[in-house]
Image (cartoon, rainbow, N blue to C red):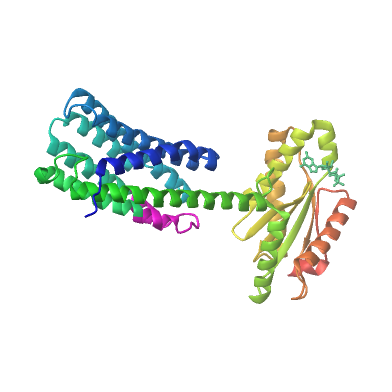
Amino acid sequence: MLKIDVPSLFIAMTLNLAIISVTLPYFMGRVNRAARCAQAGIILQTAGWLSLIASSAFPQGGWADHLLSTLAMACVSSGMVFNAMAFQLWCGRDASVRLPAAIAVVMTAGYGIGFSDYAFRVGWANGLLALQIATVVVTLCRPPRLAVGRWRWLLVICLSVQMAVLACRAVLGAFYTDEFPNFFGPYLVNQIFALSSNSMLVLSMAAILLAHRDEAARDLERLATIDGLTGVLNRRAWLKQASADLANSVRYRQPIGVLLLDLDHFKQINDLHGHALGDRALQLFAAGLRAVSRAGDTCCRYGGEEFCVLLNGANCAAIMAYDARLREWLAQHSQPALGFALSYSAGVDMPIHDSDSIDILLQRADVALYRAKAQGRGCTLVTRSDLALM
Ligand SMILES: Nc1nc2c(ncn2[C@@H]2O[C@H](COP(=O)(O)OP(=O)(O)OP(=O)(O)O)[C@@H](O)[C@H]2O)c(=O)[nH]1
């Protein structure tokens, strides 16, 4: 008959947790809040298990046992709070974990106060830890704000197993104390808990690393598509999006247009006010584009001091209205923010033939922009006079 030695399993698990706590920051890096929360959660869980094992070295019910066991409960439950924060962040939500945090506080306080009553403390601690995990499972099951991988379901499985075993321990400890008189004894529920804790630890680590990899992939995607200085799309990402939008607008016979914008005398701005203020002018301009854009408008930094907007569902009048809103926004904001008025020239184009590509639209808009510059800057011209009728 196979003998399952409960204390050895718990010691092995605590050792694994300790090794993970030390090595995880090295492999994962402390790159963002979610990673730091996950690492803090694992460190606290390790501290909790170490305290629990240390408590068994002292006389049962004595002050050292009382202190170390209560500390263990505080660490384990707050470790779960930090892990829950990481899960929230990885799902694209804010790190709100009020309910698990409140359960951690209430559970630890009640455990410390009622420590002398074995049935109470075991029922209370295990029951509330199970409830705390249940709140985390429910949150994980809610639809995430970001497209996340299957790690979410892996965590749901791991946590649900832990929750079920904790709930059993709560019931046995509180109502069938004779069958569950201590934590490290060779009782079936202890053996199941020790085995499941070990295997769930391995699976949870895999899920955490997968979640972290998901996030790293999202960061890379963002870096590859967003202009670092202004926060709007870069040219490559915009061209991809604009080509798809143009194809759709041709298919569904919807109007669409391109507005190519170039800041006026930007070299002079850099020369007179310095490169840093030049950068701020670019950021302000991008903020203006975002402020006046509506759903369906996609703007990007086309390069240097040149920007581009694709206006879905917009005819020429709507594009000129966008342009007027932008000029008004800049008139209000550029002087107070920069100390000088920021102006731009722009060219507008819309498709003539179904086969017109986004590159052709941009080429024609660039010709109109060139004419606007030649006419003295600070104005927006359309490529052909008949566009105004579209
Ligand atoms: N501060 C800053 N300047 C930039 C950036 N990218 C490009 N520039 C500057 O933008 C200036 C563009 O100058 P030009 O192409 O001569 O255009 P301009 O001075 O705006 O003249 P017009 O377009 O004819 O009105 C150059 O001096 C570039 O160095 C940037 O990221 N930050």
143 with respect to 378 (left or right): left
Residue 106 lies within the magenta run = no
Q: Residue at x 40, y 52 (%)?
A: 203
The magenta segment:
136-157
Work out whether residue 8 or residue 128 is closer to the camera in this orientation and state it: 8
Could you tell me residue 71's position as x and y percent?
A: 29, 30
The answer to whether residue 357 is visible is: yes
Q: In which quarter of the image is the N terminus?
A: bottom left
The vertical placement of 282 against 111, above or below, is below
The vertical placement of 131 against 23, above or below, is below
217 with respect to 64 (left or right): right
Work out whether residue 382 or residue 278 is closer to the camera in this orientation and state it: 278
Q: Which residue is drawn at 59% across and 58% down?
A: 295
Could you tell me residue 339's position as x and y percent?
A: 74, 32
Outermost residue to the right: 374
Q: In which quarter of the image is ligand 1?
A: top right
Could you tell me residue 15's position as x and y percent?
A: 38, 38
Work out whether residue 191 or residue 236 is closer to the camera in this orientation and state it: 191
Q: Residue at x 71, y 37 (%)?
A: 280
Outermost residue to the top: 63
